[in-house]
Image (cartoon, grey):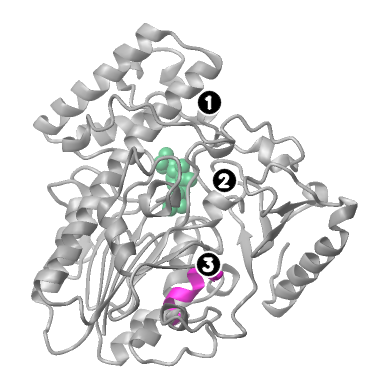
């Protein structure tokens, strides 16, 4: 059995039409939906630490962040840990990774790689491979297409007598959401609906929800995020923190790409200038601009997933290839007034997960609790390899085959460490079961931030009503606190 594991960067389940929701009809994803029709759609797939490098470290090792060393965006994965790719190689698999790698080590356990520099660029990005001697080389094209090209290139040149595992890690739709030239006008006349919690006032919440810096109205920048590039020399916009970054992204475009880009965003600039909006109307305008660019990036992702699956079909690989589609974490599409991720609230804790397994019953949905530490054991299981004892995750194969093990986990553990850092989301850990969620915000150095939140997701799926210390939840709170303490003890968590 082969594996094609596709992972995008920051793709929210809210923007995959197979998951339904308020955007499904306006911005459909037909190729991802077709994959879900053939396979299994996981409705409760979570990450352990909602950030790129930590999530990738969970994938490679099957371990929680404090076990694999990659707790924050920067910092170093513990390279003495075995990557599942190394185990596959030892068992005769051909292994490959293309696209965003984002770990501070060489891709370990791969026969072939073609990886982006850092977070990667959307236009004409730099990649390195085994032949470039550690140097990154600029390539012509748009990231989402190039990553798919390299995936297909690996498939074309692989040995046909041994199985393969191919990781396809897209850069899109990561900030700052730069669409492909052909989609710069897509959705131009659509007004996207607003999520119910768009104007959340964070009442009942601990301080971190008030103090983050990921608000569409306050933290989205005009030049870098909204692409009103021609404001870059005008006060107050010239003081925005990433004016230079945007200019560099534009400077790397080819003349014809730049022309199309400027045409599209000149139109947006004219609109912005003529409307002179303020307050809530301006916040809504920013949301529309954000959604258009993000969903344009998704359109390219959907096309390119379609192209890769088509290749597998044409080459008779659908009978012996498992296809996974997921993201490194979820993302806020205006819920709570936010973009970005990091918090343990649903939109960033949850990640899309679709798995096609040859011969399985079509179009099934799974509501069991699964987590990104499960991918390494799952892929090893597909290859017929037993899970090594040290791995914390569990294989999802029994769920795919419709036989849920009796002792399947009833809750998951989450831990976010990246503070102080961009977006100012405080450190927190917590536990979530099928109905309730307990979150504990803390300060690693002093105790000024100790604060808890408890949500009843059945009664309050949007997490607006923190019921921590409410008398009617006393028993539940105790049960969740016990579970959280149990995770911390068993997993030897060293800060919380
Ligand atoms: C960049 C982004 C942030 C984002 C982090 C982490 N800023 O620093 O908005 O939260 O990546 O994202 S940017 O101006 O450089 O775009 S992650 O997906 O890699 O974890
Ligand atoms: Ca990410």
Give the image quarter of residue 424.
Answer: top right
User: Mark 1 = which residue?
Assistant: 217
- The residue that appears at 55% across and 85% down in the rendered structure is 405
- The residue that appears at 40% across and 86% down in the rendered structure is 381
In contact (CB < 8 Å): disc 1 and disc 2: no
Q: Is residue 370 above or below residue 118?
A: below
The x, y position of residue 182, in whole percent, is 16, 37
Q: Is residue 251 above or below residue 473?
A: above
Q: Is residue 72 above or below residue 156?
A: above
User: Which part of the image, by quadrant, shows the C terminus?
Assistant: bottom right
Give the image quarter of residue 176.
Answer: top left
Q: Give whichever of 362, 376 is nearer the camera.
A: 362
Magenta residues, dominant SS class: helix
Q: Nearer the viewer, mark 1 or mark 2?
A: 1
Q: Is residue 301 above or below residue 399?
A: above
The x, y position of residue 419, in whole percent, is 62, 49
In contact (CB < 8 Å): disc 3 and disc 2: no
Precedes in sequence: disc 1 or disc 2? 1
User: Mark 2 = which residue?
Assistant: 421
- Residue 27 visible in the shown view: yes
User: Mark 3 = which residue?
Assistant: 367
**Separation of residues labelled 3 and 2 (CA atoms):** 33 Å
The magenta span reads 368-377
The x, y position of residue 113, in whole percent, is 23, 69
Local SS, label 3: loop
Q: Is residue 280 left or right of residue 155?
A: right
Outermost residue on the right side: it is 471
- The residue that appears at 35% across and 41% down in the rendered structure is 25
The x, y position of residue 458, in whole percent, is 67, 54
Residue neighbourhood size for the residue with mark 2, other residues' Cα within 10 Å, grouped as few (<14), some (14–19), many (≥20) = few
């Amino acid at each position: 059995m082969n594996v094609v594991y596709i992972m995008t960067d920051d793709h929210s389940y809210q923007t995959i039409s197979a998951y339904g929701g308020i955007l499904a009809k306006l911005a459909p994803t037909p190729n991802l939906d077709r994959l879900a029709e053939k396979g299994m759609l996981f409705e409760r797939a979570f990450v352990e630490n909602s950030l790129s490098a930590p999530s990738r470290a969970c994938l490679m090792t099957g371990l929680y962040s404090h076990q694999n060393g990659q707790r924050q965006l920067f910092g170093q994965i513990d390279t003495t840990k075995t990557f599942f790719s190394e185990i596959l190689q030892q068992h005769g698999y051909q292994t490959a990774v293309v696209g965003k790698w984002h770990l501070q080590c060489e891709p370990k356990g791969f026969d072939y790689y073609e990886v982006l520099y850092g977070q990667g660029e959307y236009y004409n990005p730099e990649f390195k491979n085994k032949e470039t001697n550690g140097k990154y080389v600029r390539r012509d094209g748009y990231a989402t297409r190039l990553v798919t090209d390299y995936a297909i290139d690996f498939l074309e040149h692989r040995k046909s007598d041994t199985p393969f595992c191919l990781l396809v890690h897209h850069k899109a739709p990561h900030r700052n959401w730069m669409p492909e030239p052909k989609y710069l006008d897509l959705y131009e006349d659509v007004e996207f609906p607003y999520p119910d919690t768009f104007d959340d006032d964070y009442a009942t919440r601990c301080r971190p929800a008030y103090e983050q810096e990921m608000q569409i109205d306050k933290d989205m920048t005009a030049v870098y995020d909204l692409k009103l590039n021609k404001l870059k020399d005008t006060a107050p916009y010239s003081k925005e923190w990433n004016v230079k970054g945007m200019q560099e992204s534009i400077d790397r475009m080819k003349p014809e790409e730049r022309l199309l880009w400027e045409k599209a965003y000149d139109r947006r600039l004219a609109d912005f200038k003529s409307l002179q909006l303020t307050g809530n109307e301006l916040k809504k305008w920013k949301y529309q601009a954000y959604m258009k660019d993000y969903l344009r990036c998704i359109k390219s992702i959907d096309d390119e997933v379609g192209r890769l699956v088509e290749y597998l079909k044409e080459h008779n690989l659908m009978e012996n290839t498992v296809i996974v589609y997921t993201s490194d974490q979820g993302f806020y599409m205006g819920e709570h007034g936010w973009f970005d991720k990091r918090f343990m609230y649903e939109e960033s804790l949850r990640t899309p997960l679709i798995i096609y397994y040859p011969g399985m019953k079509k179009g099934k949905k799974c509501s069991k609790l699964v987590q990104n530490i499960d991918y390494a054991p799952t892929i090893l299981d597909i290859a017929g390899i037993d899970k090594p004892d040290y791995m914390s995750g569990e294989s999802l194969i029994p769920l795919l085959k419709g036989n849920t093990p009796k002792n399947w986990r009833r809750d998951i553990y989450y831990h976010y460490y990246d503070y102080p850092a961009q977006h100012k989301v405080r450190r927190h850990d917590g536990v979530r079961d099928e109905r309730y969620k307990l979150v504990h915000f803390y300060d690693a150095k002093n105790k000024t931030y100790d604060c808890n939140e408890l949500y009843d997701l059945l009664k309050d799926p949007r997490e607006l009503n923190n019921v921590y210390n409410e008398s009617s939840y006393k028993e539940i709170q105790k049960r969740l606190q016990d579970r959280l303490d149990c995770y911390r003890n068993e997993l030897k968590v060293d800060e919380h």
